[in-house]
Amino acid sequence: MMRTTTILLIAGLAVAATACTESRRARNAATWSDQAADITCWTYGTETFSGRSTGKVEYNDGGRIAFVDAANGRYTTIDGECRVVYLAEGEEATPPPAAAASAVVAPPAA
């Protein structure tokens, strides 16, 4: 009985140790490298910024992010709720289709 419990405990620890490695690697790569990121920010439910950084996005304790905007090359700081999606090395993000987002879809004819 004790041997079975020990084997199950070791197997569980091995699975738990390997489960976090991919997410941890991605977090460390984003924190310590100069990867570009797609950034979208909202204030009170209204989108206030959507763009891309040229490199690293810096965060402070007050919830402000700072980065160099790829569109105009200016150092930019933003307060609000932001989603930052880091791009993989050499990856180009595809912009959302504007026409599909605003198009009204009619129900199928009967």
Image: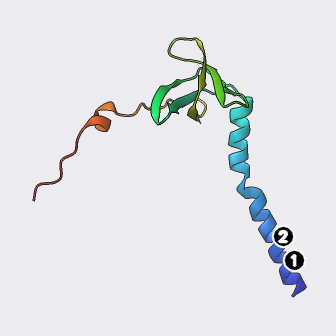
Looking at the image, do the residues carrying marks 1 and 2 touch, with CB atoms under 8 Å apart?
yes
Q: Amino acid at mark 1?
A: Thr
Residue displayed at 47% across by 36% down: 45
**Would you say 96 lies left or right of 35 here?**
left
Which part of the image, by quadrant, shows the C terminus? bottom left
Find residue 6 and name its label: 1
Farthest residue, direction right: 2
Q: Amino acid at mark 2?
A: Ile
Residue displayed at 53% across by 24% down: 52
Q: Is residue 89 above or below residue 109?
A: above
**Would you say 84 lies left or right of 92 here?**
right
Label 1: element kind: helix
Residue at mark 2: 10
Q: Is residue 110 above or below residue 42?
A: below
Q: Counting other residues with Cα less than 10 Å from the Cα at mark 1, is it few (<14), some (14-19), or many (20 or more)?
A: few
**Would you say 44 lies left or right of 106 here?**
right
Tell me the CA gap for discs 1 and 2. 6 Å
